[in-house]
């Protein structure tokens, strides 16, 4: 299993479990994450959800091979379903970022309610360097959190951020030693067991209500542009260069996507 789901003491834990590939997300894994969020939403016992990775790695982002071999038109897009489930989740979602987070491993944090990061972890969004564009409403939400110039640094230049910087910029609540991260996230999640569940859900809906439609529209627009870029000459060159361990050369592929 490349994703794991279990419930204990009112807390559903969703674990990305493909450590041999640094938890690079496949379409199967997106489907598993979406299924887990759906199960948590339907289970009256569950009061909060934790999303986490393996020790030392949260996720390396989307499986790169998918960028040059996209799903055929008309095929269900599991990543889109995961985005919808997470963005619209009524119950509190807590991210325990166990190590480096790349791409959607960072943008998913924008839709979590509490975020805790392991000391030493780095967060990066190298979409543009791969010939792609931001996703999961990050082109909307990141400038709101960071301001335009800092968001441009992270999204256009792909500058990574440290765990401490993520807290400073408002993307995370706290940095913790690796061995304390999951226990702390679980303790915070279990606090919701003592709170009125309907009141929690109603409050979360209100917090997100003002821009819920705009987030949905932004995700759809980003995915439209993202999809148009998949399989482009720029993406093929970027991915080939990555696997061949060389610097990409975009000089001959301008305007290809």
Image (cartoon, helix red, strand yellow):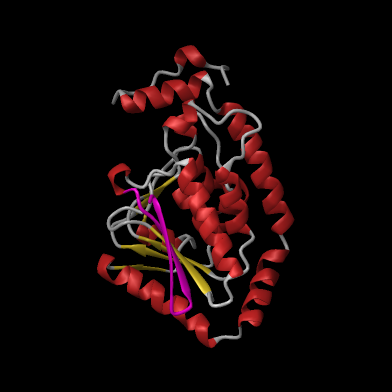
Q: Is residue 138 above or below residue 222?
A: below
Residue 150 appears in the rendering = no
Q: Position of residue 204 (x, y in %)?
A: 64, 72
Q: Quadrant of the image for the C terminus?
A: top right
Look at 55% across and 64% down and name the residue there. Answer: 39
Look at 49% across and 63% down and name the residue there. Answer: 170
The reply to whether the magenta stretch includes residue 10 is yes
The reply to whether the magenta stretch includes residue 200 is no
Magenta region, mostly helix, strand or loop?
strand
Look at 55% across and 36% down and name the residue there. Answer: 133
In this rendered view, identify the residue nearer to me: 106 or 171: 106
Look at 61% across and 81% down and name the residue there. Answer: 197
Q: Is residue 52 above or below residue 220?
A: below
The image quarter containing residue 119 is bottom left
Q: Position of residue 79 (x, y in %)?
A: 55, 45
Magenta-drawn segment = 1-18
């Amino acid at each position: 299993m490349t994703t794991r789901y279990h419930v204990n003491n009112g807390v559903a834990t969703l674990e990305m479990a493909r450590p041999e590939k640094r938890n690079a997300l496949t379409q199967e894994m997106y489907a598993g994450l979406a299924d887990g969020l759906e199960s948590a939403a339907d289970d009256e016992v569950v009061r909060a959800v934790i999303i986490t990775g393996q020790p030392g790695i949260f996720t390396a982002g989307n499986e790169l091979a998918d960028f040059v071999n996209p799903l055929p038109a008309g095929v269900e897009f599991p990543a889109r379903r995961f985005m919808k489930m997470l963005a619209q989740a009524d119950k509190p979602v807590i991210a325990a970022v166990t190590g480096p987070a790349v791409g959607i491993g960072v943008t998913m944090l924008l839709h979590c309610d509490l975020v805790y990061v392991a000391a030493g972890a780095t967060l990066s969004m190298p979409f543009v360097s791969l010939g792609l564009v931001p996703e999961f409403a990050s082109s909307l939400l990141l400038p709101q959190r960071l301001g335009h110039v800092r968001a441009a640094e992270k999204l256009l230049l792909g500058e990574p951020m440290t765990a401490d910087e993520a807290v400073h910029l408002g993307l995370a609540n706290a940095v913790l030693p690796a061995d304390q991260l999951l226990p702390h996230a679980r303790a915070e999640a279990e606090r919701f067991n003592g709170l009125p569940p309907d009141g929690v859900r109603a409050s979360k809906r209100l917090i997100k209500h003002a821009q819920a439609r705009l987030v949905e529209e932004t995700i759809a627009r980003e995915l439209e542009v993202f999809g148009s870029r998949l399989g482009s000459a720029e993406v093929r060159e970027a991915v080939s260069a990555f696997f061949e361990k060389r610097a990409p050369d975009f000089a001959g592929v301008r305007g290809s996507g």
